[in-house]
Amino acid sequence: MLKLLLWLLLFVLCWPLALLALVLYPLVWLLLLPFRLAGIAVESVFQLLRAVLFLPARLLGARA
């Protein structure tokens, strides 16, 4: 009986937090989207530089 009462107390206290998380998750995702896009762009630039720098070695037959 005590476990049921504790579970009900937890349910009553935590449902507002669950609704808040449900509402805030899309907003946080939208706020972090530019940083994710910038990370993809920076990673692409580094991969391009790596490909350009290793091109002579690949042309000469070096193994990866």
Image (cartoon, grey):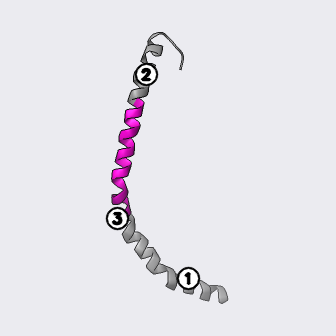
Amino acid under disc 1: Leu
**Real-space Cα separation, disc 3 to disc 1, in angstroms:** 26 Å
Q: Main secondary structure of the magenta part?
A: helix
Helix, strand or loop status at disc 1? helix
**x%, y% of residue 52?**
39, 22
Residue position marked by numbered label 3 in the rendering: 27
Residue position marked by numbered label 2 in the rendering: 53
Residue, far top: 60
Residue under the image location 41 percent in, 74 percent down: 20
Q: Which mark is residue 19?
A: none
Residue position marked by numbered label 1 in the rendering: 10
Q: In the figure, 48 relative to 9: above or below?
A: above
**Real-space Cα separation, disc 2 to disc 3, in angstroms:** 40 Å
| Eye-nearest disc, 3 or 1 | 3
Q: Which residues are magenta?
A: 26-47
Q: Residues within 10 Å of mark 2 (few under 14, many from 20)?
A: few
